[in-house]
Amino acid sequence: MRLRLRAGVEKKEPSRAIIHLDMDCFYAAIEVRDRPELRGKPVGVGGARDRRGVLTTCNYEARKFGVHSAMPTFMALQRCPKLIVLPTRFDVYRRESATIRAILHRFTPLVEPLSLDEAYLDVSEHPGAPGPLAEVIRKLIYQKTSLTASAGIGPNKLIAKIASDLNKPNGQYEIAPDDVPAFMAALPVRKIWGIGAITEQKLQQRGIATCGDLQRYTRIQLQEIFGKFGAELYDLSRGTDDRPVEPHRERKSLSNEETFAINLETLAACEERLEELFADLMADLAQKENSRVVTKIFLKLKFADFTRTTVERAGLSPSLGEYRKLLAEAFARTGKSVRLMGVGVRFAPLEAPDAAQLSLL
């Protein structure tokens, strides 16, 4: 908890109590619930069996074979030949999601949905303790839907999100405010949002494996290494996250970007890194935003002199080939070496149901 000095008196700010609720294999769990003959079998939900298909999710029986969300369907079938691949039924998923959100709103008006199967709740003003409250919520969801949920409880979004992954499936984990420093010191850096395989590799090259290792660096040092994200890493590695729970927050876009340790001098070098960024973007889309309508795709570059350029196109499906075209156009504008590259999509407003959805598969 932070201390504020007012009129010479130190006063403790009240701790927030945040619950991160995550439905267990939501889409796959619904399919198994509705088709009991699938119980105990490996099930995936998502794309067709050709090379362009991508799994939106899979159940734990499939994960035992190394199958995971956002994996190409053909690869999932190679790892698990008996995998049962079912098409998505977003009308059903949305209906169940609405039922779950109605339950969440019984306990607090501060509910921020992240996707159909995930949400933050700010229960700071609720008279009940957050841990037992999360248990009650999870039991009510199961009674109403026959679906299980996992939960994380902490003093902010970051901690609650990390905690929700620690006792899955159908479990919960609570991290008290006083336990945050020790918890973060031992936490692997990969658990921090925004750190993917590439950034993790850079950190490992510097001998940084845990948040405790990261805490040895100053904010300025991290900014020099990772740009703007370095300043965020300084706070995140300490478990600091002041973001409020925003009930009416609607994601307008989704993107991934990377600041390179060494500037990229050629278009070919940029294309190599583009493939990794695109894969990360598609994984995020498949897992969290598969039901949203994509209206535009875009690519941005920051050059060595810190100038920027962005290219975007409407009406295009987010494919690697289309992003390569955007990259070629953006790079040709200056020919300068590239310091940062990002790829993303823009969504239609949720209240625009008549827009044509672009397939991600």
Image: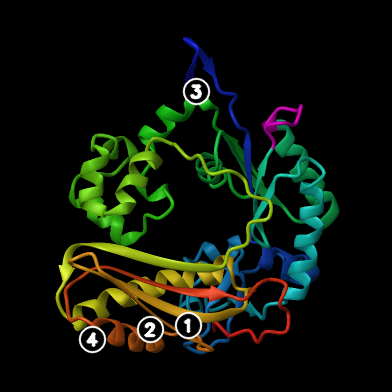
Q: Would you say the residues marked 2 and 3 are in contact, meaning their CB atoms lie under 8 Å apart?
A: no
Q: Secondary structure at mark 1?
A: loop
Look at the picture and state if 164 lies above or below 6.
below
Q: Would you say the residues marked 1 and 2 are in contact, meaning their CB atoms lie under 8 Å apart?
A: yes
Sequence-first tag of 1 and 4:
1
* Residue where numbered disc 1 is placed: 318
Q: Would you say the residues marked 4 and 3 are in contact, meaning their CB atoms lie under 8 Å apart?
A: no
Marks 1 and 4, how far apart in space? Answer: 21 Å
Is residue 36 visible in the rendered image? The answer is: no
Location of residue 217 (image quadrant): top left
Marks 2 and 3, how far apart in space? Answer: 46 Å
* Residue where numbered disc 4 is placed: 332
Sequence-first tag of 4 and 3:
3
Q: Position of residue 227 (x, y in %)?
A: 27, 54
Which of label 2 and label 4 is nearer to you? 4
Q: Residue furthest right?
A: 144
Q: Nearer the viewer, residue 155 or 69?
A: 155
Sequence-first tag of 2 and 3:
3
> What secondary structure is the magenta-colored segment mainly?
loop
Q: Residue furthest top?
A: 8
The magenta-colored residue range is: 123-131
Q: Position of residue 359 (x, y in %)?
A: 58, 85
Residue occupying image coordinates x 48% and y 78% = 72
* Residue where numbered disc 3 is placed: 178
